Amino acid sequence: MKKDIINISIVNKGRLKIESENIFKKAKLKILTKSDRSLIASIKGYPSIRIIYQNASEIIQALGTGTCEIGISGKDLWRESEASIQSKISLIKQYEWGKSDLVVAVSKSWLDCVNPTDLEEISYEFFNKKKRLMRCATKFKNLTNEWMSSRGITQYDLVTSLGATENSVEISKADFITDLSSSGETLRQNNLKVIDDGIILKSSACLFASKNSLKNKEVKKILKLLIKN
Amino acid sequence: MKLKNSFNQILKSQNFKYIELDSIIESKHILKRSGGNFRQYLFSFYDQNFKEWSLRPDLTISSVTKFIKDKSKNRTKWYYTGEAYRKSNTRSNSVIKRQTGFEIYASNNENKDDEEIVKTSIKIFKKTNFKKAQLNIGNIEIFYALVNKLDMPIRWKERIKRHFSREAYLNKLLKKLSTNSDINFEIVKQDKKRAEKLRKENPKKLFSGRSLKEILDRFDIKNYSDPRVNSNKKNVKIIRDYFKISCSIEKAPVILNNFFKKNNLNIIISPNYFPIKKNNFKNVKILFTTNIGRNVPYYSNMVFNIQVKIKSKIQNLISGGRYNGLVKNLGYTKSVPAVGAAIDLNLL
């Protein structure tokens, strides 16, 4: 059955919302909302398009499960998503805004830890002397596992962090962290340093489309307008 | 089914006792052995006491935990058959691996038991419909001996030994070792200044789970007593050349001894070292190869596999080896030598 409505998901708050709406403005696509708090909108002159305001992670899920056709979200969230979701989404354009790096950071006082090879050796110090696995606090389990594996680090355990990951080391919740950092200031304020070769991913906002929807002419047309800006 | 029964008969006739293994295993045992990274391959869940369990990702680890539970001290020979469950990164790989495994714990004579496991594996292969096979035998102990004899910092020797089973990463490590590309001399200079300041503080003070003493001790070893000032290109070349050695089992002691002599390494391999000294088996080609057993982190000494051709693709029908450190690593009070092998029933 042919789907008539094209759903475009954008972030529901903050700077990402403003920047995403600017993309539409530049493409001369006027977003019409009933009120400031309304989370569903339409586009003037395009009755078949529906704008859905969502959480950035949910946008990736929606694209992967086919509940939306086009979305603007972070590259970090796309790369962190499960392989079954990731493979169903195409990255159409990477923007110059919403930039941040996913980094590996350790205590500044770990003078002997400057690169992944040090971290690997220290993980064995935890395993042999302290009889436990070294703990890493993160919101990005999949990307962290991938990075650790590629650097030969296996003796660690991940501790889920839902926010304020930077204080996990100070409050002894974890021994080191992986987290997003734009300027590095929050890390510095929390006595953390990024190790050499410690950038897991360079992220920024991206325009995505679900792979299935790329066959749809209307979707292609909208993407063409959005890509230009 | 018929084949499985005939395998079981061979194992029974050699006094291997059949055992049942638990289907689930406490996740911490697996993570202890394989590290947190392995979590991505586990089917895990929590019980009512918030203890994390996983469907067994391989049968050896279930067998070892059973051995530990039984508190057995004597030489134990057993076999088991069943399924292991592991998530895969590739879509085509099945998550269910069917295996029959057989093992000998608490060997009195390790060489003799190695020989028994390898010869039993050949007998099992002979019962299959495959006409030809290649038996590859290696020994990780030789690699460890080689690394120990090289002139390089101890921590680098340990690091290289630790990553024998991770081929891609070991190659990266060797590249770093030969070029010193991982040392940022500017950062070292700054950190040396900071270290002097920190020396005045209480050495027991903790920083992210590590005492200041531990941090400074490692810092000093790395930057003062163990610095890599010389290029290790020669050592890296020896390691890389070692991994190229592959020859008939009869010639292995001579070829290895020549290799060690050429590189001025005081290691001698006795002609009786390998579990099979001479190839008396029809339709089985037997090779000594340095480059096998590199995907299983717990092998410690002899390793082997029996390869067959299936639709022009080489597959490991039977793989095995010695894992002397695993029993203690999984929580037993003492080290127990163990050797075993597993038949990949998915290939039959």
Image (spheres, coloured by chain):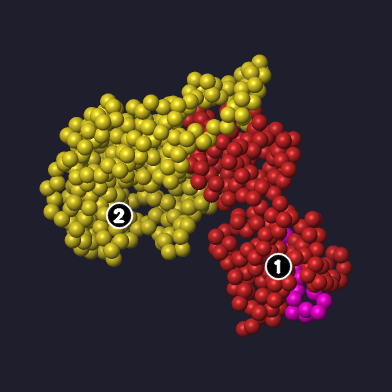
Chain colours: A red, B yellow
Q: Which residue lies at the image location 18% right of the left edge and 53% below the top edge?
A: B284
Label 1 Cα crowd, 10 Å radius (few <14 / some 14-19 / many 20+): some
Residue pictured at 45% horizontal, 39% vertical: B175
User: What amino acid is labelled 1 in the image?
Assistant: Ile
Q: Which residues are magenta?
A: A42-56
Q: Residues within 10 Å of mark 2 (few under 14, many from 20)?
A: some
Q: Which mark is residue A227?
A: 1
Residue at left 26%, top 31%? Answer: B262
| Residue A2 versus residue A92 in the image, above or below | below
Whether B318 is among the magenta residues is no
**A50 is within the stretch colored magenta:** yes
| Marker count (numbered) | 2
Q: CA distance from mark 2 to mark 1?
A: 50 Å
Write down the residue under mark 2: B316
**Secondary structure of residue under mark 2:** strand
In the rendered view, tell whether residue A9 sits above or below residue A123.
below
For the question of whether residue B58 can be seen, the reply is: yes
Name the quarter where the N terminus of chain B is drawn.
Answer: bottom left
Foreground of the two, B65 or B37: B37
Classify the position of the C terminus of chain B by image quarter.
bottom left
Relative side of B2 to B238, left or right: left
Q: Position of residue B28 (x, y in %)?
A: 49, 42
Magenta: predominant secondary structure element?
Answer: strand
Q: Amino acid at mark 2?
A: Asn
Is residue A140 shown left or right of residue B336? right
Q: Position of residue A188 (x, y in %)?
A: 72, 35
Q: Mark yes or no: residue A174 visible.
A: no
Identify the chain of the residue marked 2, using the numbered disc in the image: B
Q: Please, which chain is the residue tagged with disc 1 on?
A: A
In the shown orientation, is residue A48 left or right of residue A67? right
Q: Is residue A137 above or below residue B157?
A: below
